[in-house]
Image (cartoon, rainbow, N blue to C red):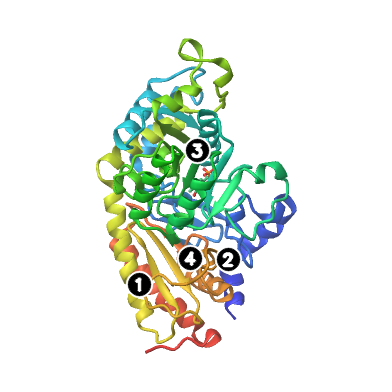
Amino acid sequence: MLEALYLARFAHSAQLAVEAVARFPGGVTHDGRTAIPFPLFITQATGAYKWDVDGNKLIDYWCGHGALLLGHGHPTVIAAVQAQLERGTHLGGESPLALRWAELIQTLVPGAERVRFTSSGTEATMLALRLARACTGRPKIVRFQGHFHGWHDMATPGADPDDPHAGLPAELLGNIITLPADLDVVADTLAHTNDVAAVILEPTGAAYGTVPLPDSFLQNLRALTSDRDVLLICDEVVTGFRVSPGGAAARAGVVADLTCLAKILAGGLPGGAVVGREVLMRRLATGEDAGDPRGRIRHQGTYNANPLSAAAGVVCLELVAAGAPAVAAERGRELLAALNQVFLSYATHGMTAYGEGSIVHLFADPAVDVAPGQVPAGLTVNALKRGGNPRLLNALRLAMQLNGTDLMRGRSAFVSAAHTSADVAATAAALADALGMLQLDFGLRKI
Ligand SMILES: Cc1ncc(COP(=O)(O)O)c(C=O)c1O
């Protein structure tokens, strides 16, 4: 019944999905856009909304995979990018724009003594890990179960315990130590392993806080790594400029040795950066600044500090400095409360919204005992990342889309400064209607 409704409402997407299977592996351009029975094909977006090929309007909570803190097509970002388009899309040299971009990063992010731009978050973590190994002369990296750092060789193992390691050299796997997010285990590992270059983490927990960590974890990890002379790399690709203007580490009062940035950094255009201590970043220096050439790290990239990304990044970070993260966070808190209010109207267990600020996660599994507003306890990292019962979650995603709301992968919301209280109310109404559609099939009991 639900699928029939879905097929009728999103008929053109269904057609394009057939064509997509013949053109893209798996019919998608990003693993995370995979959807059953088919992904929606989107043609345009503005503010908090997007429209699909069938003309359906959806409140969007993907928000550019978290990159669009200001919402789609913020007028200031559009104007800056349009102006830069006229002046050139690649300037074949350094630009004053990139300097201003770096200056804003240095003002906002503690410890950003030097900045090296990349084209993506994946490139940023790849470079940070290589820097750490070069600077310490040690080969190993400690990372945490389920934390996501992009898809390069060093980032893939440990991101998902179920993932196959196809294509990864076996000798590389020996240099990646994947630990549970348990400080005693980290302390024990660092005490017994003397060839660890760095510890890398998502500072608010795996998958942007889907498996949350308190600020105290980061604070204690900082102390632990400093004591052991191991570098701390904060992957703030999602949390940077969102959790606070300076990111999650800034909020916790922690200064990482190296920080990876992307997404909001470039105002919704492609871009990333590694920032950190001058004594480490010096390894990237060329020309007269370069030290011993054998210790140097080669780093190129045609689109590093691309002027369109820089133009968007500069105005976006100016709006971050002016308070955009707090606006989005306020709306996120409203959304969290409103969604849990709907869950509270059900006697069925296991449905909750949790998160912090502008990042909200849903969990739905009637077999799990959790109250609305709480984080399910005692689950594995994988189970929490999965978000509950796959069949219920998928049905909920379809029902939410049928009611005009598109959650990120069906279970998370990146709330932007463009979302309004009216959007929040409409989303809560969509959840109420969606649960109503699922009531019979999933035995959900209303109070
Ligand atoms: C924490 C984290 N690190 C790194 C990345 C990779 O960034 P990109 O997709 O720009 O390569 C992501 C992407 O979502 C991320 O969430």
What is the C-alpha distance between the residues marked 4 and 2? 20 Å
What is the C-alpha distance between the residues marked 3 and 1? 34 Å
What is the C-alpha distance between the residues marked 1 and 4? 14 Å
In this rendering, is residue 209 above or below 362?
above
Q: What numbered label is drawn on residue 270?
A: 3
Q: Residue at x 43, y 72 (%)?
A: 376
Q: What numbered label is drawn on residue 10?
A: 2
Q: What numbered label is drawn on residue 411?
A: 4
Q: Earlier in the sequence, mark 1 or mark 4?
A: 1
Is residue 70 at all visible to an observer of this figure?
A: no
Q: Earlier in the sequence, mark 3 or mark 2?
A: 2
Total labels: the figure holds 4
Percent across and percent down for residue 143 are 52, 49
Name the kind of residue labelled 2 in the image.
Phe
Name the kind of residue labelled 3 in the image.
Pro
Q: Is residue 331 left or right of residue 209?
A: left
Q: Determine which quarter of the picture holds residue 139.
A: top right
